[in-house]
């Protein structure tokens, strides 16, 4: 393998993992077999990445995160401290459900806040923003802001992470980037 990444001496990286250039794996983290981790990722302290998880480029995983088999994160995803994914909808200790894992796709640019839980089988849209402590139990649209337990949509976010305020024509401008967005038929898109 011709990649250069950093792994702290206490990290455990199983065989058959692909880890991209300039990725950093910090203290006490465990990367399990069959994982594919992109370039320029940061895997914080005490993170578990289960077999066959896929992380795109520039994914930031904060401390104490659990990413279980069935999860795919596209580029530029942020996973906040102590958030967790599930991968079985009806777990029981005495019932082996390996091979029945549900897939969860976290699309490009999405952010998931500290201590949030993503119940498996529910995709997170592009640039969506999941508030701290939220429990996601259904699909989250692109650019949506969701909070609470169960998570409910309370607004829309820009690609820079600012709440969007739409005028009567359904147009909003990001406070930081000045990019414009359109709200139409319950969906948000960036105006090119």
Image (cartoon, rainbow, N blue to C red):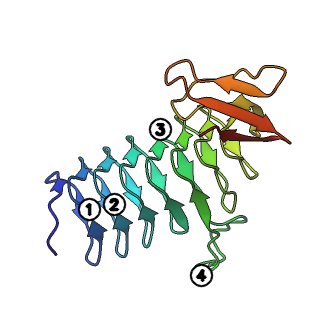
> How many residues crowd around disc 1 within 10 Å: few (fewer than 14), some, or many (20 or more)?
many
Q: CA separation, marks 2 and 4?
A: 25 Å
Q: Nearer the viewer, mark 1 or mark 3?
A: 1
Residue topped by disc 4 = 99
Pointer 2 with pointer 3, Cβ within 8 A: no
What secondary structure is found at the residue carrying circle 3?
A: loop
Find residue 20 and name its label: 1
Q: CA separation, marks 1 and 3?
A: 21 Å
Q: Is residue 114 visible?
A: yes
Against 64, is 148 above or below? above
Residue topped by disc 2 = 38
What secondary structure is found at the residue carrying circle 2?
A: loop
Find residue 80 and name its label: 3
Instruction: Identify the residue shown where x is 54% and y is 49%.
Output: 84
Sequence-first tag of 1 and 3: 1
Q: CA separation, marks 1 and 2?
A: 5 Å
Q: CA separation, marks 4 and 3?
A: 28 Å
- Give the quadrant of the C terminus: top right
Report x, y in % for residue 76.
43, 47
> How many residues crowd around disc 4 within 10 Å: few (fewer than 14), some, or many (20 or more)?
few
Q: Nearer the viewer, mark 2 or mark 4?
A: 2
Pointer 1 with pointer 4, Cβ within 8 A: no
Against 50, is 152 above or below? above
Q: CA separation, marks 2 and 3?
A: 18 Å
> How many residues crowd around disc 3 within 10 Å: few (fewer than 14), some, or many (20 or more)?
many
Against 134, is 42 above or below? below
Q: Nearer the viewer, mark 4 or mark 3?
A: 3
Sequence-first tag of 2 and 4: 2
Pointer 1 with pointer 2, Cβ within 8 A: yes
Report x, y in % for residue 70.
55, 68
């Amino acid at each position: 393998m011709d990649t250069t990444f950093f792994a702290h001496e206490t990290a455990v990286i199983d065989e058959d993992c692909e880890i991209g250039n300039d990725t950093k794996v910090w203290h006490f983290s465990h990367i399990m077999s069959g994982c594919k981790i992109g370039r320029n990722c940061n895997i914080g302290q005490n993170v578990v990445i289960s077999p066959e998880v896929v992380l795109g480029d520039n994914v930031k995983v904060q401390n104490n995160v659990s990413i279980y088999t069935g999860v795919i994160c596209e580029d530029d995803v942020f996973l906040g401290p102590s958030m967790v994914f599930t991968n079985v909808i009806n777990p029981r200790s005495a019932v082996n459900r390996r091979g029945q894992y549900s897939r969860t796709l976290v699309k490009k640019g999405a952010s998931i806040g500290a201590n949030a839980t993503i119940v498996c089988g529910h995709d997170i849209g592009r640039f969506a923003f999941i508030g701290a402590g939220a429990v996601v139990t259904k699909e989250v649209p692109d650019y949506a802001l969701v909070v609470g337990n169960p998570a409910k949509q309370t607004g829309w976010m820009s690609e820079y992470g600012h709440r969007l305020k739409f005028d009567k024509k359904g147009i909003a401008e990001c406070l930081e980037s000045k990019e414009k967005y359109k709200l139409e038929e319950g969906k948000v898109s960036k105006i090119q």
